[in-house]
Amino acid sequence: MRVLLMPFAFIYKLILLFRHLLYDYKIKHSERFNEPVICVGNLSFGGTGKTPHIEYITRLLQSNYQVAILSRGYRRQTKGFILAQKNSAFETIGDEPRQYLNKFEKVIVAVDEKRVRGIKNLLQLNPKPEVILLDDAFQHRAVSAGLNILLTDYHQLYPQDHLFPAGRLRDVKSAAHRADIIVVTKTPKVFSPFIYRQLSTLINPRPHQKLFFSYLTYGRFLPVKPQQTLSPPNINGTILLFCGIANPYPLQEYLQTKCNELILVDFPDHHNFSEKDMQSIIKQYESILGKNKMIITTEKDAMRLIDSPYLSRFDGIPFFYIPIEVKFHHEKDSNFDKEILDYVRKNHTNN
């Protein structure tokens, strides 16, 4: 099938290369801002861990700078620039911005499908943000970010992938040269020097690029409904995991070590759960034999459920989500932090 799709991927590649040439030769304008602008993105269609990496950088900066996160707000039911408020629903701003809003009280969260317009609107605020994080904007050449961070999934590295529709790449591999930092995400927690050298050779970063390796860590189970009084039962029973994310496999691997049986109910990425979906999930839960059972979903999916009129269907059922964070291998977290902080200090001082 991949061989059959290669001609279509080649046509797509020509279109992408032509688009990049327009920007490279200044035929199309790419706007740069004086304020620190950090872009976190990828070359593939999602699933590389942009959200937890945005959160990592936010935690790093929020104590000393007014941080703003600008996202497209994928699959929201609105258009244009929207400054998120505490009561903003995911239908208005999207699930990922809703997650940022839920986690960071002092951080500005906004959405706009046109990143240049979004940045300009943020800079009109009083007080204006001191650092702007662009969520999933690596392919948006209309903005020339001061620091570009490119993420690639350990199990689906961009050098070994193919352009859509033959593969999962949405941009040409050569676009990676625009990155200042490349992060291989979702690596194993135990990471040998041999694999480190092997991946470094495969990615072959340019002299100006820094290469880092991150992995996921999981927090304690939190109730999807804050008022829920049920505690997580003994995990060595059965877990019903349902999720609508691009790559659920790291969470699957983690939960399989925590229970006797894991049942996965998989939905498309950014899926908007309907009443029928809820009924189906609960029916599968009720069909599980024994009392030692629970339902788990991802943090991102929970953001699409907390305002759902159908959430009450889960009353009396142990229903939790599990937050995730990223960490870096080989004591490189301090070096990654230094790259971010040095860039922000330098550019913030110049404003």
Image (tube, helix red, strand yellow):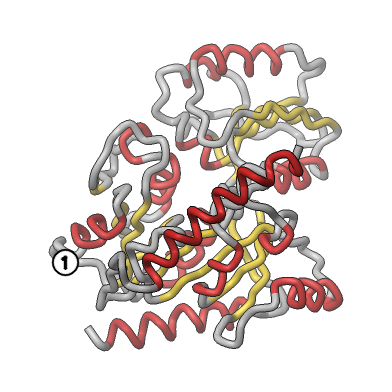
* The one of 190 and 103 positioned closer to us in this rendering: 190
Residue under the image location 27 percent in, 75 percent down: 35
Q: Nearer the viewer, residue 119 or 160?
A: 160
Q: Does residue 111 appear in this view?
A: no
Work out whether 299 lies above or below 345: above
Percent across and percent down for residue 114 are 29, 52
Q: In this image, 318 relative to 50: left or right?
A: right
Any part of residue 38 in sight: yes
Q: Residue at x 31, y 53 (%)?
A: 109
**Residues packed near mark 1 inside 10 Å, few (<14), some (14 to 19) or many (20 plus):** few
Count every numbered label the image shows and give the total: 1
In the image, taking residue 78 as reference, residue 307 lies left or right, namely right
Quadrant assignment for the N terminus:
top right
Q: Residue at x 50, y 61 (%)?
A: 17
- Determine whether the residue tagged by mark 1 lies in a helix, strand or loop: loop
Q: Is residue 109 above or below residue 75?
A: below
Measured as percent of width and height from the top left, residue 162 is found at 68, 53
- Residue at horizontal 40%, vertical 69%? 38
Image quarter in which the C terminus is found = bottom left
- In the picture of the structure, the residue carrying the numbered disc 1 is 127
Question: Which amino acid, mark 1?
Answer: Pro
Q: Nearer the viewer, residue 30 or 27?
A: 27
Q: Against 278, is 209 above or below?
A: below
Q: Nearer the viewer, residue 14 or 334?
A: 14
Where residue 52 appears, as percent x and y from the top left, is 54, 56
Where residue 305 appears, as percent x and y from the top left, is 47, 29
